[in-house]
């Protein structure tokens, strides 16, 4: 299989962006990760993986943290509708707080407006 599937390509895109930010676009590892993202070929993926493994631990941790954050940010940005059914009152236009409409009365300081 010469091409990576879409989730791997998305992960490689995030990784290549973070590598460019952290290590610079002229860094050998950054360039190889970018090449692996662009081509998706198995040989490029292996070479990028080997070069990434050769990075110092502290650089890998920085890249990992930023890439993980960006991946979560990307996933969270997708609008996922809630399964919760929110109960609304019949008169939504009325913005006034009516103590009789609640099951337990609200505290006095919320009702008294002096």
Image: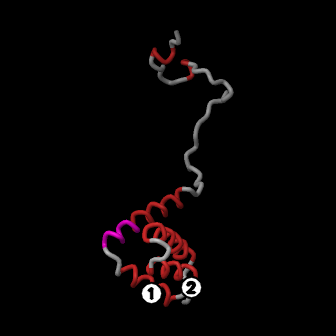
**Between 47 and 20, the one nearer to me in the picture:** 20
Location of residue 51 (image quadrant):
bottom left
**In the image, which disc is placed on residue 46?**
1
Contact? badges 2 and 1 (CB < 8 Å): no
Location of residue 54 (image quadrant):
bottom left
Q: Give the range drawn in magenta.
A: 57-63
Q: How many marks?
A: 2
**Between 98 and 110, the one nearer to me in the picture:** 110
Where 110 falls versus 68 (above or below)? above
Q: Residue at x 68, y 27 (%)?
A: 93
Q: Which residue is drawn at 31% across and 69% down?
A: 58
Between marks 2 and 1, how big is the CA–CA gap? 12 Å
**Between 10 and 97, the one nearer to me in the picture:** 10
Tag 2 residue: 3
Q: How crowded is mark 1: few (under 14 residues within 10 Å), some or many (20 or more)?
A: some
Where 68 falls versus 40 (above or below)? above
- Spot occupied by residue 79 in the image (x, y as percentages of width and height): 60, 54
Q: Residues within 10 Å of mark 2 (few under 14, many from 20)?
A: some
Viewer-nearest of labels 2 and 1? 1
Q: Does the magenta stretch include residue 99?
A: no
Q: Earlier in the sequence, mark 2 or mark 1?
A: 2
Where 112 falls versus 53 (above or below)? above
């Amino acid at each position: 299989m010469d091409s990576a599937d879409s989730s791997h390509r998305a992960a490689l895109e995030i990784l290549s962006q973070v590598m460019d930010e952290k290590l610079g676009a002229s860094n050998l590892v950054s360039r190889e990760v970018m090449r692996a993202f662009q081509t998706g070929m198995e040989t490029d993926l292996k070479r990028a993986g080997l070069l990434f493994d050769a990075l110092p631990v502290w650089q890998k941790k920085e890249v990992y943290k930023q890439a993980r954050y960006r991946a979560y940010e990307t996933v969270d940005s997708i609008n996922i509708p809630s399964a919760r059914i929110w109960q609304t009152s019949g008169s939504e236009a009325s913005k006034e707080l009516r103590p009789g409409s609640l099951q337990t009365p609200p505290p006095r300081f919320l009702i008294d407006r002096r």
